[in-house]
Image (cartoon, rainbow, N blue to C red):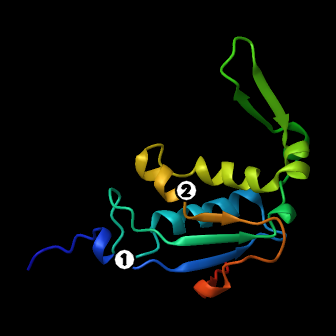
Amino acid sequence: MSTFMPNAQNIERKWYVIDAEGKTLGKVATEAATLLRGKHKPVFTPHVDCGDFVIIINAEKVVLTGKKLEQKTYYHHTGYIGNLKEIKYKTLMKTKPEFAVKLAIRRMLPDSVLGRKQLTRVRIFRGAEHPHAAQQPEERVF
């Protein structure tokens, strides 16, 4: 008997909805990264993209614990000399909460071609509505 190896032809992808209201940013990102990688499936293989689609709603109501809202900072470089930009999470959560959630998820995925491909399957929405009702997503409670 040979070992089953999943590949692109025999992967079944489901859709999951995660409600981020009142949950911490790290818990939401961890659950989303697990679903995107496919680690919840019995056929999980690290080198195969076998994850599912994830919809995150209420991204603006995600919680940062402790003093992270005032002290945590997001840095990025523009590519020009001396242009290291910094944004406090207090500002980031007011203006772009979807980006803050996506950033947390991205840092939990592998830094490779596979991780970038898995990140394309996450959809993050600020409010409670999403346009993916036709995919019949399952509610994921954790």
Q: In this view, does 136 lie above or below 50?
A: below
Q: Is residue 85 above or below residue 18?
A: above
- Residue on which the image places disc 1: 42
Q: Distance between the residues labelled 2 and 1?
A: 21 Å
Around disc 1, counting alpha carbons within 10 Å, would you say few (fewer than 14), some (14 to 19), or many (20 or more)? few
Q: In this view, does 14 lie above or below 46?
A: below
86 and 123: which one is in front?
A: 123
What kind of element bears circle 2?
helix
> Which dot marks residue 119?
2
Q: Which corner quadrant of the image does residue 74 belong to?
A: top right
Taking 112 as reference, is 106 left or right? Answer: right
Q: Where does residue 54 sit, x and y in percent of width and height?
A: 60, 70
Q: Nearer the viewer, mark 2 or mark 1?
A: 2
Whether residue 67 is visible here, answered yes or no, is no
Residue type at the position of mark 1: Pro
Q: Count the marks: how many? A: 2
Taking 113 as reference, is 31 left or right? Answer: right
Q: Where does residue 56 sit, x and y in percent of width and height?
A: 70, 69
Residue type at the position of mark 2: Leu
